[in-house]
Image (cartoon, rainbow, N blue to C red):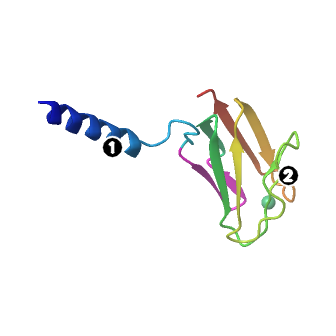
Amino acid sequence: MKYQSIAVLAATIALAAAAPPQTAAPQPGASVTIANFAYAPATLTIAAGTTVRFRNDDSDAHTVTADDGMFDSGGLDAHGTYQHTFDQPGTYRYVCAIHPWMKGTIVVTPR
Ligand SMILES: [Cu+2]
């Protein structure tokens, strides 16, 4: 019976070692597409810690520029991408600096 206990213990240790680390659990990514001079979705709701990937599908350049200056992609050419991680809950409004009528909002909820 003693060997059986050791086998169970060994299996337990093996399972613990295989478990993913509990720290720094990133949220699954989210994405916003820029097409036809609009952000889609125009409003995206995510949990804090989520990385949002913006992709420009237009042939014209666009930017993703926060109203409060917290983030700014700079000019994104066709098929250009930009990523930003939203760590703090809140409502983040952004525009395209080239076409200021293009507006988007990221709503970040607490985890
Ligand atoms: Cu634009």
**What residue do we see at 66% from left, 33% from top?**
108
User: Which stretch appears magenta?
Assistant: 28-41
- Taking 68 as reference, is 62 left or right? left
**What residue do we see at 83% from left, 64% from top?**
75
- Across and down, in percent, residue 96 comes to 81, 54
Residue that badge 1 annotates: 14
Q: In front: 101, or 96?
A: 96
- Across and down, in percent, residue 51 comes to 64, 47
Quadrant the N terminus occupies: top left
- Across and down, in percent, residue 29 comes to 57, 48
Q: Give the number of the disc on residue 74.
A: none
Q: In front: 70, or 59?
A: 70
Q: For mark 2, does the 10 Å Cα neighbourhood hold few (<14), some (14 to 19), or many (20 or more) residues?
A: few
Quarter assignment of residue 77: bottom right
Q: Residue furthest front?
A: 2
Magenta span: helix, strand or loop, mainly? strand
Please tell me whether residue 34 belongs to the stretch shown in magenta.
Answer: yes
Q: In front: 69, or 88?
A: 88
Label 1, label 2: how far apart the Cα atoms are: 56 Å
- Across and down, in percent, residue 97 comes to 87, 55
Quarter assignment of residue 8: top left
Residue that badge 2 annotates: 100
Q: Amino acid at mark 2?
A: Pro
Q: Considering only order in the chain, which callout, 2 or 1, is on the residue closer to the N terminus?
A: 1
Quadrant the C terminus occupies: top right
Question: Quarter for ligand 1?
Answer: bottom right
**What residue do we see at 69% from left, 45% from top?**
85
Q: CB of residue at label 2: within 8 Å of ligand 1?
A: no
Question: Could you say whether the residue bearing mark 1 is in a helix, strand or loop?
Answer: helix
